[in-house]
Image (spheres, rainbow, N blue to C red):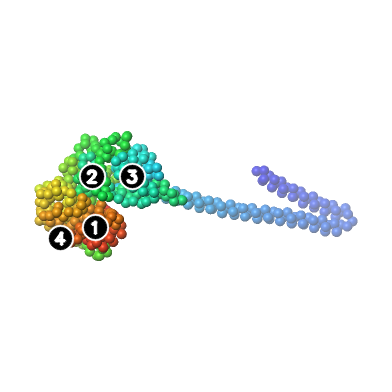
Amino acid sequence: MRGAFFRRLRQYILAIVVVAVGAVIVATVFLTEDRLQWAIFLTGILVATVLTESVKVLRAEWVLMRRTAQLASMKEKYEQEAGRRRRAEEKNADAQVHLRLMEETLSTMIVLFDADGNCRYHNRAFRDWLNLKAEFVDGKHIRLLLGSKAYSAIATAVRQSLDGQSLHYEHFQEMSGRAVYRLLVDHAPQFDAVGNVTGFFFLAEDITKRGDLSPSATNQGRVTEKPANVSVREEYSNQDMFIDDFSGQIDGRHDEGKFFIAAIQRGEFTLYCQLISPLPVDSGKTVHYEILIRLMEEEGCMIPPGAFFPLAERNGLMPYLDRWVVQHVLQWVANQRNLRRNNDSIFFINVAAATIGDPEFPAFLQKMLAEYGMPGSVFCFEVAESDLAARRDSIADFIRQVRLCGCLVALSGFGRDGVSFDNIRGFQVDFLKIDGGTIVNVLSNPINQAKVVAIDRVAKKIGVKTVAEMVESDEITAKLCEIGIDFAQGFGISRPRRLME
């Protein structure tokens, strides 16, 4: 306001000066003898004064116009920047929603541990795995979260990750109740701007299959352990509580059997499939698929297979679940063949021990094949090699019965406890699925490589196809092609996808 006052005062002073100079000129003209000369002189002064002030006014107006233009430009830039910021905030909000959705629905367990081994980030799958609330996970050390025994088994891997190494390994963990969780684990180190390790991401995928539910001894490249019987407050790692609490959440009365029947009827079980590709991958030969089953929670999140398989086993419901799988796969395949798709593909199904011993299952299978008009060769039933010794007679009868229906048979987990073809003597099988723990280290472990070569050589002599499990990279695929393995399965070939209707 003070500046505006002085600008108005300057205008008044200029007017007074002009009037005073004019008055002097008029007085001079009339009071002096040399009127003309004085008039010319004073008129020149007046004109010069007016021109000077006019120049100042024009310059001030030009400066004002330039500043106004600059202000308008800055205002426009500010509005544009505000618009960009608003759009960025909207996109960030959308990204946060999508990130939250991914965090809540991904079945892969994701944890970020800092350089001291403390948890700085985790997703829902990891919380569900431990059956803990977020406040019991955030900031806790990896030893407290996983338990002392589990931590000691992976301590070397943790140290290597904090030294900047990326790791990939398979982890078997035996729980109380004789259930075995099979995990595929990755460590991804994190670095700061100058290259120092600030921590590592721990990623674990539950790849438990029915064949993994029986106890297994510790083998090279795998860890089998039973966690200590400790409380959540002391160790934050009693995974048995996950199974117990899951059972309790079923209906409040711990009626697990009714829950499974109701879950199947409500369609809460979902079928997934994973590609079994011929080698070489681009050979153009028919691809096959392994059928996987998942259970969805009310919130839309998947419950780990290693959690609900033991409950189904404990309640004698695996035959019921296996029948549901057979019927729905046949329904899907029949629909696909009507659309002229997957005409020659074989669908591999793991069957539970209770199903193998179910005398009524072959009749059910024959009935379903006839009902959907499908040949038995659409199915290849997988039997775990580790079950052969304990249930030799029932497995032999099961294989004979399903082969009478035209179905194929695969022996899964072959080579897990050493290579011995004596176990399969007398069993007619079509595929040998080589244990993933052997395949995952086939490049770095000469013993594993020799084991795979020996399995393939003997399999070819007896007319059995080989399938390599847990193929995780192009380099492993190339080595398997070089050896002569017939098929490959794993995340390096294809991740599991939903079997769409």
Residue located beneath label 2 in the image: 180
Closer to the N terminus: mark 1 or mark 2? Answer: 2
Q: What residue is shown at x 16% (from left), y 62% (from top)?
A: 461
Most extreme residue toward the front, as rendered? 447
Residue 238 seen in render: yes
Q: CA distance from mark 1 to mark 2?
A: 27 Å
Residue located beneath label 3 in the image: 155
Q: What residue is shown at x 24% (from left), y 65% (from top)?
A: 284
- Residue 454 image-quadrant placement: bottom left
Identify the amino acid type marked 3.
Ala
Q: What residue is shown at x 36% (from left), y 40% (from top)?
A: 141
Q: Which one is closest to the eye, mark 4 or mark 2?
A: 4
Residue located beneath label 1 in the image: 450
Q: CA distance from mark 3 to mark 4?
A: 43 Å
Identify the amino acid type marked 1.
Ala
Q: Between residues 293 and 40, which one lies in front from this camera angle? A: 293
Q: CA distance from mark 1 to mark 4?
A: 19 Å
